[in-house]
Image (cartoon, rainbow, N blue to C red):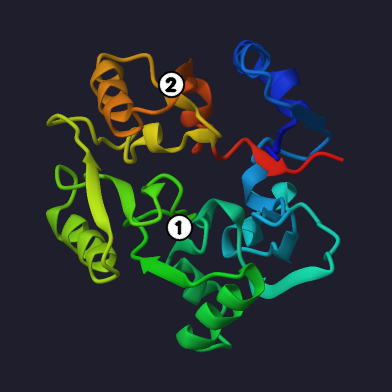
Amino acid sequence: MEPTILISNLLIKNHVKIADALRSIFNKYNIKYEILETKDIWMRDFMPFLLDDGRLVSYDYDLDYLKDEKYSHLKTKIQPLKEHINLVLDGGNFVRLGGKAIMTDKIFIENPSKTKSEIIEIIKQKCGLKELIIIPRQPYDMLGHSDGMARWIDENSVLVNDFSNASKSFNDRLIRSLKKCGLNIKFMRYGEGFFSKKRDWGAYLNFIKIKDVLIVPIYGICDDDIAIEQIKKIYSDCSVETINLREIIELGGALHCITAEKFGR
């Protein structure tokens, strides 16, 4: 069973061209989608995790950044489900494939009353994981999300943004954290000058994958062609579609951030 993709009514209202382009791709590949009324477009952050067996797992959406007056209006209250993680988390920091998931060490900051091992075991047990891989969050990233840093190729391989042009020391730490888990690593390479104050992360990895369709956000810049060429080689068994998501990227997220999933009724 393939999931139904969820998007916000605010995406339809405030980002018309993007919403139309996204729905056009959904219709082209017969991908089911639903529009939900929400307080903000960042569906991924507060919607429950969808597991392979169809279970939805909720969590405490009470991140430190939501305590800032600037972002407090985005705090969405989700009624705890039967399957609930009693930890402060958000969905942008949960990248799963099968029995493995990747999260940044931001989860330890958000849950100071528990030890690191306790936090890891709770998430593994609730989500049926064999392994929870912890990576360092990107420097100066207030959100601490993993979904713009690393994405699964298969259960033994990951595609990772090459941050060496921005910070070699951070990039080395990121690679070590993945290699010690025995993962094969492929890199999204960037030219000198790609990473800047306005572009301090590679939004290309913030894609969505539905079965054999990969929908990738692009900036509308010359680097797009290089990035998409790499993605097509790595995900060679997928049909790759692109959407110019620059106006969303400038708000701090991309395609994975503005979507969530559930199985059909």
Q: Of 133 and 15, which appears nearest the observer?
A: 133
Measured as percent of width and height from the top left, residue 240 is found at 43, 21
Where's residue 72, x and y in %? 70, 53
Residue at 73% in and 27% down: 32
Could you tell me which residue is drawn at 29 percent across and 34 percent down? 234
Q: Can residue 29 be seen in this view?
A: yes
Tell me which amino acid carries mark 1.
Gly
User: Dot 1: what SS?
Assistant: loop
Q: Is 167 drawn above or below residue 120 in the view shown?
A: above
Q: Position of residue 248 (x, y in %)?
A: 53, 27
Quarter of the image that includes the C terminus: top right
Q: Earlier in the sequence, mark 2 or mark 1?
A: 1
Q: Residue at x 69, y 62 (%)?
A: 61
Q: Position of residue 165 (x, y in %)?
A: 14, 42
Q: Quadrant of residue 205?
A: top left
Q: Return the mark for residue 144.
A: 1
Q: Is 63 situated above or below 259?
A: below
Question: Is residue 70 visible in the rendered structure shown here?
Answer: no
The residue that disc 2 covers is 240
